[in-house]
Image (tube, rainbow, N blue to C red):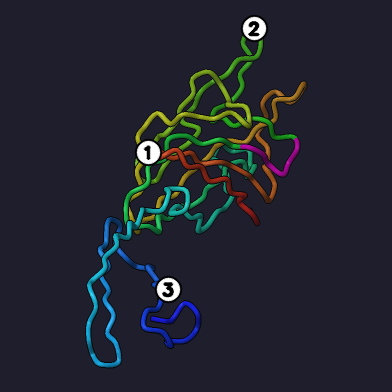
Amino acid sequence: MSASDGEFDQPKEDVNRSIDTAGWATGHHELSIRGTDGNLTQGPTNSTIVNIAPLASAERAQIVSSRKTRNNDGDGVQDTVKFTLENTGSSPVSIQNITIRDAENFQVDQVGNGSTVFNRGWSWDDAGPEIVSSRTGSLYDSTDGPVPLRTTVQLQSNEVVSDGEQTEYTITEFRDNRFGGFGSNEDPGSQVTLTLGFEDGSEKTVTLDNL
């Protein structure tokens, strides 16, 4: 430990020391110290409690890869985005909601899996979930058609990623719902921005680059 004034030259000295707590387990840790003078006489023991709180879920959840792909619907459009999330912490994270905020392609304004059909007017033919987890399966499946961008989607299944594990998520399909677009599938471009909401109330907004 070091003298607070820079030198041990008094009968009584205030002392300090920085301690690196990286790698410490979460919870309470008791630290005890006592001083010894030049005559090897020891003073009383003083103790303090250091509480190591777990990182918020948003800090533990890291995007490690992302990519675009086709939805195997025969139109040849790369309208589906996949990204892999890794839990780098020491306790599980639970995703509660996802908001697809923006896509580089300005024509994209909604996300939905299926096709538009004409039967006395245009309607929506649902073909499966909009958000899928490689761990859990379907996380959100709207039967009411595509979901507009910037809409917070509450997941329909409990999605938990254990510490040290990875999960790949699929968002399909990116669509154009402008007048005359008829919900056509669109390539979202090279960037998609989304926000993940976690059970502990923390949020993580990320931009998936180089898609």
Q: Is residue 34 above or below residue 205?
A: below
Q: Which residue is at a point 64% across and 45% down the rendered structure image?
A: 192
**Camera-nearest residue between 159 and 77:** 159
Name the kind of residue labelled 1 in the image.
Gly
Which mark is in front, 1 or 3? 3
* Mark linked to residue 120: 2
Residue 199, quarter of the rendered image:
top left
Q: Residue most toward the top?
A: 120
**C-alpha distance separating marks 2 and 3:** 74 Å
Separation of residues labelled 1 and 2 (CA atoms): 34 Å
For residue 137, the mark is 1
- The residue where tag 3 is placed is 18
Whether residue 86 appears in magenta in the rendering, the answer is no
Q: Give the Cα distance between marks 1 and 3.
A: 47 Å
Which three-letter amino acid code belongs to the residue tagged 2?
A: Arg
- Residue furthest out toward the front: 11
Q: Earlier in the sequence, mark 1 or mark 3?
A: 3
Whether 44 is drawn above or below 178: the answer is: below
Q: Is residue 209 above or below residue 22?
A: above
Question: SS at mark 2?
Answer: loop
Q: Is residue 142 above or below residue 40?
A: above
| Secondary element at tag 3 | loop
- Residue 116 point in image, percent of width and height: 61, 22
Tell me residue 190's x, y (percent). 68, 51
Residues in magenta, as a range: 101-106
> Picture quarter containing residue 182?
top right
